[in-house]
Image: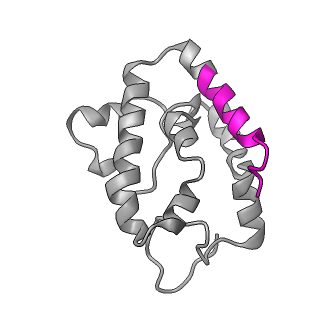
Amino acid sequence: MRRLDGVTTTVTAGTDPRITRVGGWLRRLKIDELPQLVNVVLGEMSIVGPRPDVAGWADLLEGPDRVVLSVRPGITGPASVAFRHEEDMLDAADDPEVYNREVIWPEKVRLNRNYVEGWSLREDVRWILATVTSVLARGDSR
């Protein structure tokens, strides 16, 4: 992505003018996630877990929802699979910032909290397979 004067939001819709042509291609194929494998090797992230959020969002977690901060962030997980096409959802919204804050964010928190509270190795394997399946799904590369 590139910086644009006057654009201060951290919410990124698919048609966001900050996304470069190459960046859009990398994002669609989820290749932009590969550098995070270095973070996994360094022990800073896990393969499966709640996705790390941009600055400010984790600060909004309250009470029992803060449990998602007790585990290493992951490259994939339930919220990543559920919101695989988040950029398209934001494109379709009248106000992407509001839609993210009122619809997407609360659902991601719910999914991530359920993941942490019900963690099992079997579920991690299931989320890895679901992620691979969603990336390889026919017609998904647009």
Q: Which residue is at a point 72% across and 34% down the rendered structure image?
A: 132
Using the rendered view, name the quadrant where residue 18 is placed. Answer: bottom right
Name the side, left or right, on which 62 lies relative to 49. left
- Can see residue 12? no
Please say if 113 is above or below 19.
Answer: above
Whether residue 114 is visible here, answered yes or no, is: yes
User: x, y (%) of residue 14?
Assistant: 60, 66
Q: In what quadrant of the picture does the N terminus appear? A: bottom right
List x then y, in percent, for residue 3: 58, 77
Of residue 33 and residue 29, the one placed in the foreground of this image is: 29
Residue name at image x 69 percent, y 39 percent: 134
| Residue 31 location (% of width, % of height) | 75, 49
Q: Which residues are magenta?
A: 126-142
Q: From the viewer's side, name the closer residue of 130 and 67.
A: 130
Quarter of the figure with residue 138: top right
Residue at (53% x, 68% y) in the render: 91
Nearer to us in this view, 30 or 46: 30
Quadrant occupied by the C terminus:
bottom right
Q: Main secondary structure of the magenta part?
A: helix
Give how far across and how far down residue 120 sits, in percent: 50, 14
Q: Is residue 134 magenta?
A: yes
Magenta-span inclusion, residue 36: no
